[in-house]
Amino acid sequence: ARRMTLMEVSETKQINNPVLLAKWLNHELGNKKQEMFLVVLLDSMCKFIDYRILFTGTIDKANIYPRDIIAYCIDNNAVNMILVHNHPSNNLIPSNADIDVTQKIILASEMVGIKVLDHLIVSNNDYFSFKEHEII
């Protein structure tokens, strides 16, 4: 199921809403016992380029380094990105730390011309979109 939904995502002409992406990410990260932070890279037309789990943490936090995210984007010629992490507790409400790190990543990426389109928190079967909730 994970591979099939990843194929759907990668073959999509444009990723312009989180539903399809969340469906794949629920399978990718939703049942993990540790918090993981993944970045999805997109080109200027919001077409899928690549993704990678960049940070793995404990059951309730992961240390995130914006410089590593920016380097990954630049290495892959990404113009846009979507940030994603899971909450092993299945509580989809973003913490203050989630909001703070998102703002830091947005500021850092704007300096190099990369746009953060959304930040998703995923669980087994649901997601929370920062963009849909007007946090970013």
Image (cartoon, rainbow, N blue to C red):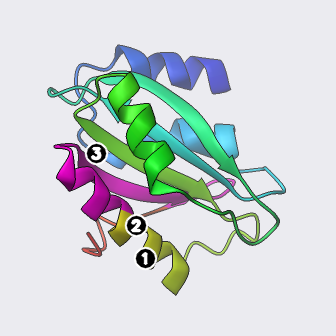
In the rendered image, residue 7 lying in the magenta stretch gets the answer no
Q: Is residue 85 above or below residue 91?
A: above
Q: Which mark is residue 99?
A: 1
Question: At x 25% / y 39%, what residue is drawn?
Answer: 80
| Badge 1 amino acid | Ile
Q: Are marks 2 and 1 in contact (CB under 8 Å)?
A: yes
Q: Observer-nearest residue: 127 or 38?
A: 38
In the image, taking residue 97 as reference, residue 117 lies left or right, namely: left
Inter-mark Cα distance, 2 to 1: 5 Å
Task: Provide the residue span drawn in magenta.
Answer: 105-127
Figure quadrant of residue 136: bottom left
Q: Position of residue 62 (x, y in %)?
A: 68, 63
Identify residue for label 2: 102
Residue bearing the label numbered 3: 17
**Residue in the picture at 71% in, 69% down:** 61
Classify mark 2: helix, strand or loop: helix
